[in-house]
Amino acid sequence: MIAATVEIRCQRILLRPWRSGDEEALVRYANNREIWKNLRDRFPHPFTWKDAEEWIALVKAQGNPPLNFAILFAGEPIGGVGLERLSDVYRMTAEVGYWLGEPFWGRGLATEAVQTTVSYAFDHFDFERLQAGVYEWNPRSCRVLERAGFKCEARLKRSVFKGGRLLDSLLYARLRNE
């Protein structure tokens, strides 16, 4: 079993579970419409201190091994990456989600976080498949997934309603033995 205090060191970043004390950085970077527009509506905007406290409490309650991590750069949480196990007949699949504070875009840090999370997922869980959805207006996220070994499997036409618009989403996947 993995301890809740697990830390995964990468080349330039550190992944560790979210914890009390991360609220300030979480609000600073998550409270951004440019981030919100690329995530599910359950990721609130504006993102408040209360939202940060609730998120940290939620991930702490998920137990061991951890599924959600803060992405730290230079010792500060600048984003998040996590796994969500699907249910029923899809239980061997997890959805990968990630976000990064806008000042850190374009540096390859999200790719590093996703690549590391893929290795962690396949090393510590029974997942056979990891998948991620990307809204059609976010080609940068497509590149993150492609660099992490994901392949685009489908374009789901008019499958997402976000920011008052109906748009396509792209389904990316990576299998355990790929």
Image: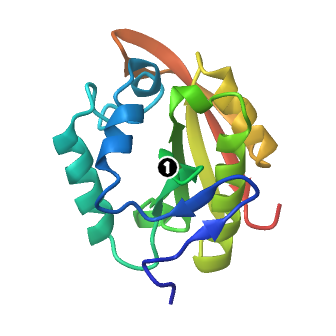
Q: Residue at x 34, y 76 (%)?
A: 63
Q: Residue at x 51, y 39 (%)?
A: 99
- Coordinates of residue 17 in the picture (x, y in percent): 44, 65
Residue toward you, 49 or 83:
49
- Coordinates of residue 134 in the picture (x, y in percent): 57, 31
Q: Residue at x 72, y 34 (%)?
A: 107
* Residue 152 seen in the figure: no
* Residue 135 seen in the figure: yes
Relative to residue 153, is residue 56 depicted above or below? below
- Residue farthest to the top? 165
Task: Judge the density around disc 1: few (<14), some (14-19), many (≥20) Cα neighbours within 10 Å.
Answer: some
Q: Which residue does the numbered mark 1 point to in the structure image?
A: 76
Amino acid carrying label 1: it is Glu
Q: Residue at x 34, y 28 (%)?
A: 31
- Residue farthest to the bottom? 1
- Coordinates of residue 171 in the picture (x, y in percent): 62, 37
Quadrant the C terminus occupies: bottom right
Indicate left or right for 109 with 35 as reference: right
Indicate left or right for 10 with 69 as reference: right
- Coordinates of residue 100 in the picture (x, y in percent): 53, 37
Relative to residue 123, is residue 51 depicted above or below? above
Q: Secondary structure at mark 1?
A: strand
Task: Please say which color scheme the image uses.
Answer: rainbow
